[in-house]
Amino acid sequence: MKKTQWYKDAVCYQIWPRSFCDGNGDGIGDLEGVLSKLDYLQDLGINCIWFSPLYCSPNADMGYDISDYRNISPDHGDNELFKKVLDEAHKRGIKVIMDLVVNHTSDEHEWFVKGIDKNSKYHDYYHWRDGKGNKNPNNWSSLFEGKAWEYNKENGQYYLHLFSKKQPDLKMENPEVRKEVKEIMKYWLDMGVDGFREDVITFTSKRDGLPNGFPIPQACGMEHYKDGPRIHEFLSEFREVLDDYDCFVVGEAPLMTPKNALKYIEEKPGQELDMMFHFQHMEADCIFMDCLNKPFSLKQLKKVFSNWQESLYGKAWNALYMENHDHPRIINRYGSVEYREESAKSIANSYMLQCGTPFVYQGQELGMINIDLPNVEDYQDIFAVNNAKTLKLFGFSDAKIEERLKTSSRGNARTPVQWDDTDNAGFTTGTPWMPVNPSYKDGINAKAEIADPNSVYNHYKALIKFRKENPIAVYGKYKEYCKSSKELYVYERTYEGKKMLVICSYSDKAADFKAPAGYDLSKGKAILCNYETNPVSANGFTTRPYETRVYVFD
Ligand code: GLC
Ligand code: CA
């Protein structure tokens, strides 16, 4: 099969189905809802959808705990309806990739249920171990919920769960498990899907051992499963399946560096993944985890951006994102709610014009913001269980812990998409499974923004159009300027004699921008701006809060 690398020209849109659009009024987003919004997505200009898990799931971790890999959850529809969505998307020139969650299953998956019996072939699908006396096999922690081992009364053994207790880890070392994974991939690819986003894929090879490294309590033991000993072997094996299709795979990879990433994504024979979702640029206001916050540092963000751009250029392809279902809204983190529209646009220009494939998360194109709910539980995020413990260990007061859990919760990104200003923002005619952010009444909704030429939505739309029409935005070489500025992020792209200069303020303070040597701003055309462009004097200008401009030179 000839690979076309179509994904390099794509702009992807992530749908987190539960909160996208409800078609049948039960308060839960579904595929009927998606169908009704395909024209919206086509109009926005995106040409690939990534669906967060749509499969059957008891929802201990909102779909990331799968009990049946081959069937769409009745909450969202059924396989026939999915096929219809797939066909309708394809008709509109939109590809579709699925989430592949194979580090773990749900404890309600039949493999796990049957495998409790030590004589079942499924027993060896998971990491079952005897305890040490009446203690856990080792002292690893789970990322979500207490220790990484859970005792099972029926067989007297412990099973490994790196995430919640309801997410037992699969034993990828077992060739039967890998065979299952390959068959699942084939099943969806044969149906017509165009690739996968592979959930925490770099955690799937485990090695025994006692912890000696990670400073964060819930990562205790991670050095034995992050980029584990057989990971490259496993991914190469999966690639054999993928090579029969013109598809792409993007792997989620916590704590990934560019140097390490190249081992997975370098474009040479044996390449395992096409792209990688790393987390480094998501840590400019926190220490590894959103709940351990620190003041936002633009300099840190810029360093990460440039490191990935420079390390991968000509060798591998970047996946570009600022939001997904695992982090609070970016405006609240790196931007400003006070300058919501300005900062949303500046952030958009700053990452979507880098070299790589941009991903936009549902509602990001509307400039959606965090929600303020009375209780931590209202955010419905299992991550909070461990985060509360970690914050306590770090000495935070109870009041501060509560505040941190709310502002860092993944629930902030999971409120229903705001479609219009009718009840429940037009998300559902019933009772939404999660509260709708009241900000839909203040103009943050698709209907109002489509009508407003200066909206965040229309900025994204123009940006996507520009990227599609200008190869410089996709393939151009990257160079950063003004590196020491604490307010401005500035970079150029160059391609086939053309140049483009991207200027983004990440500050509400005025900053003096001076064009780099060799640039004459008066000869460029300013596009994708978020203010009226005032006359350029002396080859520079003073930025207004979160001002952004892109100068193109032919
Ligand atoms: C990934 C997903 C996240 C999920 C976790 C466990 O990080 O993005 O939502 O909770 O894996 O599956
Ligand atoms: Ca529904």
Image (spheres, rainbow, N blue to C red):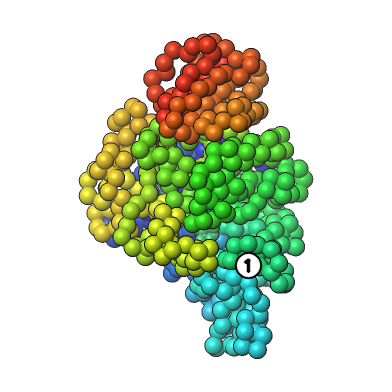
Q: Amino acid at mark 1?
A: Cys
**Considering only vertical position in the picture, is 393 above or below 550?**
below
Instruction: Give percent across and percent down for residue 436.
Output: 30, 52
Instruction: Give percent across and percent down for residue 134.
Output: 61, 88
Residue occupying image coordinates x 55% and y 19%: 514
The residue singled out by tag 1 in the image is: 220
Splitting the image into 4 quarters, where does residue 153 fall? bottom right
Residue reaching furthest to the right? 269
Q: How many circles with numbers are drawn on the protein?
A: 1
Splitting the image into 4 quarters, where does residue 78 fall? bottom left
Mark 1 residue element: loop
Instruction: Give percent across and percent down for residue 458.
Output: 38, 31
Q: Nearer the viewer, residue 314 or 223?
A: 223
Q: Is residue 405 left or right of residue 204?
A: left
**Considering only vertical position in the picture, is 363 above or below 487?**
below
Residue occupying image coordinates x 44% and y 39%: 335
Residue 24 in sight here:
no
